[in-house]
Image: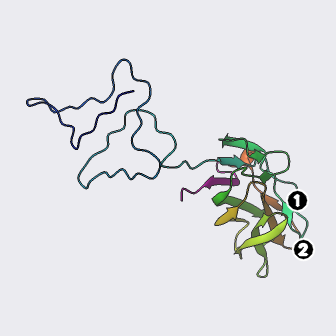
């Protein structure tokens, strides 16, 4: 292998496009370990190819929804909601059988979703709650004090997670009588949801 030593590579007069590599080229290496490659201010990088190894990806990620209403929730009891239908799941990290998101990749994750509650005997002391559990313990709670039979709670939180940490979502209603449910897709165009994605750091 020959070595070319120079300070500047430029095109010949009258042309403006510099081609590095041609028909015999399969890999082009820029620099070696410890080098810094500078892209000066004002330079535009136009990528029409496939990039790997830099820039980061927001995966693993998933979103799932509740396909039908839950049965009546027990009063004043944390009830895990198993979102049984996936909209997408980039890495197969959400389990529709047990309602757990286990990322398999360490990092910071944005957890989000929405609950729509149905509560047919709303009173002045009623509470609706969404709770996020991490590794089986409550990590965050979101309250609503409804004044109608339907109420919506949106939730979101960032968690540091290792490969085996897992997230579950619970619902809770404080109301001693009537119907207490979380609404699903069978009777609702916007069913209750649970999703997550990795944050690029």
Residue drawn at point x = 41 percent, y = 51 percent: 35
Q: For the view shown, which residue lies furthest in the front direction?
A: 2
| Front in this rendered view, residue 106 or 194 | 106
Q: Is residue 143 above or below residue 191?
A: below
Per the image, the residue denoted by label 1 is 72
Q: Is residue 174 above or below residue 156?
A: below
| Front in this rendered view, residue 176 or 91 | 91
Q: Is residue 64 magenta?
A: no
Location of the N terminus by quadrant is: top left
The crowding category of the residue bearing disc 2, from other C-alpha atoms within 10 Å (few below 14, some 14 to 19, many at least 20), is some
For the record, the magenta segment spans 189-201
Quarter of the image where one finds residue 158: bottom right
Q: Position of residue 87 (x, y in %)?
A: 66, 42
Q: Is residue 191 magenta?
A: yes
The number of numbered badges drawn on the structure is 2
Q: Is residue 113 above or below residue 186?
A: below
Disc 2 and disc 1: Cα gap in Å? Answer: 12 Å
Q: Position of residue 95 (x, y in %)?
A: 79, 46
Q: Position of residue 115 (x, y in %)?
A: 71, 60
Per the image, the residue denoted by label 2 is 176
Residue drawn at point x = 80 percent, y = 71 percent: 138
Q: For the view shown, which residue lies furthest in the bottom direction?
A: 125
Residue 32 placement, left or right of 121: left
């Amino acid at each position: 292998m020959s070595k070319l030593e120079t300070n500047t590579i430029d095109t010949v007069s009258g042309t403006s496009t510099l081609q590095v590599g041609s028909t015999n080229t399969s890999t082009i290496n820029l620099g070696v370990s410890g080098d810094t490659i500078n892209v000066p201010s004002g330079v535009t990088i136009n990528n029409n190819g496939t990039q790997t190894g830099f820039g980061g990806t927001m995966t693993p990620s998933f979103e799932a929804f509740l396909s039908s209403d839950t049965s009546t929730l027990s009063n004043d009891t944390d009830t895990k909601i198993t979102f049984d239908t996936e909209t997408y799941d980039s890495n197969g990290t959400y389990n529709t059988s047990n309602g757990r998101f286990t990322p398999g990749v360490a990092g910071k994750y944005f957890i989000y979703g929405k609950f729509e509650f149905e509560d047919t005997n709303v009173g002045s002391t009623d509470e609706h709650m969404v709770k996020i559990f991490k590794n089986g313990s409550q990590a965050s709670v979101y309250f609503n004090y409804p004044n109608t039979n339907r109420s919506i709670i949106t939730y979101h939180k960032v968690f540091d997670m290792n490969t085996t940490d897992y997230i579950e979502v619970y619902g809770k209603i404080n109301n001693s009588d009537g119907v207490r449910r979380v609404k699903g897709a069978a009777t609702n165009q916007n069913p209750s949801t649970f999703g997550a994605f990795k944050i690029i750091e």
